[in-house]
Image (tube, coloured by chain):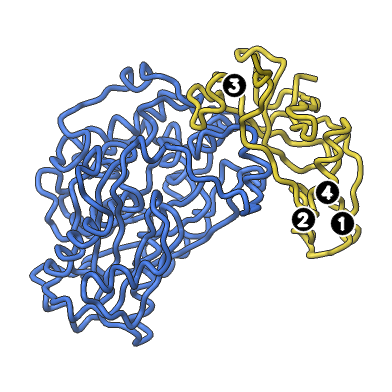
Chain colours: A yellow, B blue
Amino acid sequence: MSDTATQYEKPLPVPSDISAPYWEGLNAGELRLQRCGDCGRYVFYPRSVCPYCLGERLEWVSASGRGRLYSYTIVRRAMNPAFAADVPYVFAIVELEEGPRVTTNIIGCALEDVRVDMPVKAAYDSVTSEVALLKFEPE
Amino acid sequence: MTGIGEMKPTRSPDGKSTLGIWTDVSREAVLDAGLSIGDIDGLLIGPPITEQAQMWPSILGEYLGVHPKYGNVVDLGGASAAGMVWRAAAAIDAGLARAVLCVTGEASDVETFYAPRARRATQQLPYREFEVPYGPMGVNSGYALIAARHMYEYGTTSQQLAKIAVDQRTNACANPDALFYGKPLTVDDVLASPLVVDPLHLLEIVRPCTGGAALVVVAPELVKESANAPVWLLGAGESSRGMMLSQMDSITTSPITEAAPKAFEMAGVSHEDIDLISVYDCYTITVLVTLEDAGFCAKGKGGPFVEEHDFTYRGDMPLNTHGGQLSFGQPGLAGGMSHVTEAVRQLQGRAGERQVSGCEIAFVNGNGGIMSEQVSLVLGVE
């Protein structure tokens, strides 16, 4: 009768003024990171100051979207009921080519084929019309 | 430390409230220390995980009739209890208090622990924005990530991790107060239990329950008030890092590498002097990483080390002789306190069937978050 089937009930990020460019990037299919204009290091998650040198000149740059799987687990029981239909799923940390690590999900890969250190590339999962989550699939 | 009080963990609250549990264990600890409530002039509290309030020291102080000259909440997660011990000693040393009551525990069960929390969307905390949307299973998935990476870097196996749970269960079977008393376990049992968050099986994961524990830290002149042998804080060290694993340089090495050496150095003892290891064990991997980072074995060698040693109360390296939280139960922050109370009990020679003979020096470690907050203690008899 109604079209509530497309309702997304999992927790969504609430972007801040500081993180908005990151989420806008993902929504446009682009991974953006901050880079410190003082020490040159890439920064994730988005911040108002560089966590390595306290510098304030953080600039948004495009990242390659490539990385390697740092570690992963297969979640077989959902703690939040909104994820119940997804189990088992892969919850993971990916180390980006630029250095920072991100928490994510691995998609497009059979569970038994997931390996620590496997090369992965960004997959932009548009879960609503406004929000895309950064996930990864095998390179 | 002279007096302790501890409630036998139960699977559910059975009508008990957190404040009621705190009151019971506080009374027991104060009496065990040979003191009256008027002697207590310091109050340190570990906040409940499943209840929210402010000014906990005032709430409990009012209920117990304590007027603290020193009051605080110690918010280091599972490391809170160990963190209280040195804070109490420091306050006494500074002349601000003479007898500090340290209290933990809560009325909880596995259902309320895992129930969805009230939405707090206004709190724009980084982990809510960058982790929660991807579906972590509480901290379970975090420790699973540590275990998986440890296996990758060092070749650690599930059999080795399971052996930790098995030895601790043997200890719990000599502790009538343990939640899993009378239920022996084998490595095959652990490996046959369901995978919850790979590579961790159900029996490698702590069980939230109801319970509580308190202890009293006193100035030297009050030691004689108690019939118990005093246990002395010989050394302490603390080190913490951020909450999110993605932000840590390495997830397989913890800040215990800083906390433990500080505690050993202050105490002037070495690893060979330790008669009891009583360390936080929310998961099997927690114990393995702790043994490595506290220097009981080389980094990455925790797996073979576990195979080579007998961690039971009658073994060559007694560890978590009360059963650890994996087999004793995890009543909120009183789970972390159980490692302290067990060390006190063993050092005082009050551990009954599981008493370690000649127990004079113990190493205690408290662990909060996902191997984030770390407090190491070295405790000893005179």
Residue B296 % position (x, y) = 42, 47
In the rendered image, residues at marks 2 and 4 fall on the same chain: yes
> Are the residues at dot 2 and dot 1 in contact (C-beta closer than 8 Å)?
yes
Residue A30: name its quadrant. top right
- Point out the tag, 2 or 1, that comes first from the N-terminus: 2
Q: Residue at x 22, y 33 (%)?
A: B180
Q: Position of residue B12 (x, y in %)?
A: 25, 39
Q: Please state which of residues A109 and A132 is positioned toward the viewer in this rendering.
A: A132
Q: Chain of mark 1?
A: A
Percent x, y of residue B14? 20, 42
Residue where numbered disc 4 is placed:
A42
Are marks 1 and 4 in one subunit? yes
| Label at residue A89 | 3
Query: Nearer the viewer's eye, disc 2 or disc 4?
Result: 2
Q: Which amino acid type is marked by label 3? A: Tyr
Q: Give above or below for B323 relative to A5.
A: below
Give the residue number, with chain letter if any, for mark 1: A58
Q: Amino acid at mark 1?
A: Leu
Q: Find the distance from the CA under tag 3 to the CA under tag 1.
A: 34 Å
- Callout 2: residue from which chain? A
Q: Is residue B267 visible?
A: no
Residue at (77% x, 55% y) in the render: A47
Density class for disc 1 (Cα within 10 Å; few <14, some 14-19, many ≥20) is many
Say what secondary structure mark 2 lies in. loop
Q: Which quadrant of the structure image shows residue B220?
A: bottom left
What is the three-letter code of the residue carrying label 2?
Arg
Q: Say whether mark 2 and mark 3 are on the same chain.
A: yes
Quadrant the N terminus of chain B occupies: bottom left
Rendered view: B240 above or below A19: below
Whether residue A24 is visible here, answered yes or no, is yes
User: In the current view of this chain or complex, which residue is farthest to the bottom?
Assistant: B95
